[in-house]
Image: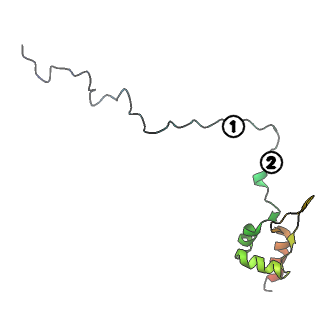
Amino acid sequence: MRATLENVSMPDRPAQDQPLLHARRPVGRPKKSPAKQPAPACKLACVSVASVPPRLLDLDATAAYLGLSPWTVRELESRGILHRVRVPLPTGVVRKLLFDREDLDRLITGWKDR
């Protein structure tokens, strides 16, 4: 009896209509599963710090808030138009330029054309 291709089964190759039993492994390190975040301690209302906008803005945030360049904000501060907030420390003051958002809002209101 002579074997033909139709009669011979090939165990290492699955039929085209059957899915592969194994998938090719991805190259590189395996991805870590995302860590589960613990449930919040408070049950009524949790306020995250990110949802509260900061009252004091640094130089870049002030420039973005006013729609000006940081150099223009520095110039306005040196001329006394913008008032910076100095945060006291036991060893001196914070050297970072900080501006109060409410002062900026009042300044914008004063700059409006009437």
Q: Quadrant of the N terminus?
A: top left
Q: Amino acid at mark 1?
A: Gln
Q: Is residue 110 left or right of residue 3?
A: right
Task: State the mark number for residue 47.
Answer: 2
Give coordinates of residue 93: x percent, y percent: 88, 64
Give coordinates of residue 18: x percent, y percent: 31, 28
Between 110 and 45, the one nearer to me in the picture: 110
The residue positioned 78% from the left and 86% from the top of the image is 113
Name the secondary structure under disc 2: loop
Give coordinates of residue 69: x percent, y percent: 70, 76
Where is 53 relative to 33, above or below? below
Q: Residues within 10 Å of mark 1 (few under 14, many from 20)?
A: few
Where is 25 relative to 79, above or below? above
The residue positioned 22% from the left and 22% from the top of the image is 10
Residue 59, image quadrant: bottom right
Where is 96 relative to 7, above or below? below
Q: Residue furthest bottom?
A: 114
Mark 1 or mark 2: name the one nearer the start of the chain. Answer: 1
- Residue with the mark numbered 1: 37
The residue positioned 79% from the left and 55% from the top of the image is 52
Between 11 and 71, the one nearer to me in the picture: 71
